[in-house]
Image (cartoon, rainbow, N blue to C red):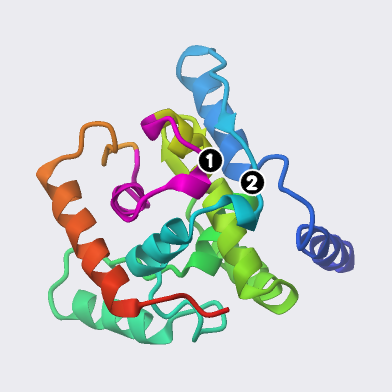
Amino acid sequence: MLFFVATSVILVYLLRWLPAPTTAFMVYRHYEDLIDDFSYKPIQYQWVGRKKISQNACAAVIASEDQQFYQHFGFDLQSIRSAINAYINGGRRLRGASTISQQVAKNLFLTPSKSFIRKGLEVWFTLLIELLWSKERILVVYLNIAEFGDHLFGIEAASQHYFGIPAKNLSRSQAAVLAATLPNPMRLRVAHPSNYVVRRQNWILRQMRNQGGLPD
């Protein structure tokens, strides 16, 4: 246990500055390939720093995924309570209320399996991330490791793949449609957006206008 705690603290601390060479979720994608048809499909992934990411991309994912990002310490307790209440009052399944910090913890360090142990690890890594990283670093890592399509990870790879431009040149509309596919880009497509994706894109654009600029 002490070895795990020390190792995880050191790893998270180093990733405060170092680019993530890969993630647990990317490795899991390769595992799925092998299980499905013994194939190997390369991951499209290119790390970029904050200065090479459009402000529009930052605003879009906050509007879409976690509007209390700068107010909470890793967990949006209000959203969690709302999700539980909705489930108790007749919801068919418990609606997700994951923050950007939680999604970074899951994608970076954990596989998609569901168990109490995995949930405990998610809480642990989320707290470490919030303690050791700045909010800007959490956002940069999230944008770099989020999945935007089949074996397509990170805002730079997505920008190049879908629009043929670097991430720093993303428009508000382009950033919003990318954010609209999160967190299920395998079903919600950027290239051929459904009516739902278009409606969600427009909702995100309205939220971006309402939230104004990002904190320094």
Residue at (59% x, 71% y) in the render: 123
**Mark number, residue 127:** none
Magenta stretch, residue numbers:
162-185
Q: Label 1 is placed on what type of residue?
A: Glu
Q: Label 2 is placed on what type of residue?
A: Val
On the image, the x and y values in percent for residue 117 come to: 59, 62
Residue at (42% x, 80% y) in the render: 68
**Visible in this render: residue 97?**
yes
- Residue 195 among those drawn in magenta: no
User: Looking at the rendering, which quadrant does residue 192 occupy?
Assistant: top left
On the image, the x and y values in percent for residue 168 come to: 52, 48
- Whether residue 91 sits left or right of residue 25 in the image: it is left
Would you name the residue on which mark 1 appears?
A: 156
**Mark number, residue 48:** 2
- Secondary structure state at the residue bearing disc 1: helix
- Whether residue 148 sits left or right of residue 14 in the image: it is left
Is 84 located above or below residue 184 in the figure?
below
- The answer to whether mark 1 and mark 2 are in CB contact below 8 A is yes
